[in-house]
Image (cartoon, grey):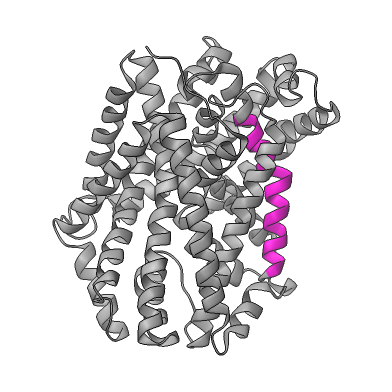
Amino acid sequence: MSERGHFNTRLGIILATAGSAVGLGNVWRFPFMTGQNGGAAFILIYLGCVFLLGIPGMVAEFIVGRHSNTNAARAYRKLAGKTPWAVTGYLGVITSMIILGFYAVVAGWCLQYLLVSIGGQLVGNPQEVADYFGSFASNPWKPVVWTVVFIFLTHLVVVRGIRHGIERASKLMMPVLLVLLVVIVIASCLLPGASAGIKFLLQPDFSKLSGSVFLEALGQAFFSLSLGTACLCTYASYFKRETHLVRSATHIALLDSFIAIMAGLMIFPAAFSVGINPDSGPSLIFITLPNVFQQAFSPAVGYVISILFYFLLALAALTSTISMHEIGTAFFHEELHVSRQKGAWVVTVVCCVIGVLCSLSMGAVDSLKIGGMTLLDFCDGLTAQILLPVGALLTCLFVGWYIPHKIVADQLTNWGKGKTTAYHVFLFLVRFVCPLCIVAVFLHQLGVI
């Protein structure tokens, strides 16, 4: 088996790992939650959750990954021995493949909308735009084709390895994504009446704050940073010995939060300029925003903005699916003792099956439902509400209570080169604060609190 790769630069680490967190959720979930939960007040709570709880959670996965220098399943097994803690890594691998399968369906929709935007076909009255999405999503073959295409695009990057595939792609895609985002934000904020959308997003409304809002912000922080998927553990296994874990986690959190806030500045000013209140989920991306682009901009500018927007979405989705694919690729490559190419093909085939079934469940095959939900919605709920919180919780408990303190201290301080103060603060957070907060989010998502 060939030698494991490593990220070549600190910039590559930050862009690749931040790319794993930046995705469609930054575009529709964060802006909507911000607007409905107190605007800037929610943002402040969210940032507090990211830096007080999200970063320690990230560092916990980094510690497991870099120390073990192997795939996620073996990393936890290496540290846990024959104890039940070893299941944490396997859980992360399974979760990542489920996410990649259904996520590729929505990512494929973005490719279809990019294509019709280029062709100038995404026009019409609001009902026609809504009808187009409904007919496309329930088509028996078009969404399936785009789903498979997107998984294969992901495969082409991952199969080239860490430096020549993931790191090189991240260094190209993330700057392009940021430039596209800035261009659309400027265009949106210059619209007549855009100030109302900016005010809606950024003006604090402390009257809306409650315990529920805090839990929503905490859940968004963990969701946004890819905690519980084994992605961070897998990527950390490619970190060099001199990589500063806390500093890297901080830079990644800053970049991810910046993109989430910019997404809000992209959506709300344009929507408010034409009197449309943005909703959440697929309806925002594929129904509401096409109408906004038509009404807010001149035909020529709206045409360009629409193309840039769906290209941005496709890039954001690709940076996420690459990380999800890599988790399984590293697992099969190292556990089955096959080439990286063969390991990547196993993931691609499995995720294509999941993706195709999820796509067909959106209307083409009505019987593909579980508990009255489409297979896509079921997979989304299973991962977001159960598997991700459980994975993040187990990792914090594992690092905080089970792993020998010397391993944690060595990784956190780069073998004594850093300050030990951060070690004691980190240990307190992952032992007590993070687990309690994750349990609270878990119970809140299940409707218990």
In the rendered view of the protein, which quadrant contains the N terminus? Answer: top left
- Is residue 41 within the magenta segment? yes
Q: Residue at x 62, y 35 (%)?
A: 10
Query: Does residue 36 show up?
Result: no
Q: Using residue 376 as the reference point, say whether residue 425 is left or right of it.
A: right
Q: Does 273 sit above or below residue 423?
A: below
Q: Residue at x 57, y 89 (%)?
A: 193
Q: Which residues are magenta?
A: 40-61
Q: Quadrant of residue 346?
A: top left
Q: Residue at x 47, y 83 (%)?
A: 276
Task: Work out whether residue 2 or residue 357 is closer to the camera in this orientation and state it.
Answer: 2
Q: Using residue 96 as the reference point, say whether residue 264 is left or right of it.
A: right
Q: Residue at x 17, y 52 (%)?
A: 367
Q: Does 124 sit above or below residue 233?
A: below
x and y percentages locating residue 142 in the rendered image: 17, 58
- Is residue 436 within the magenta segment? no
Query: Does residue 412 show up?
Result: yes
Task: Work out whether residue 37 or residue 154 is closer to the camera in this orientation and state it.
Answer: 154
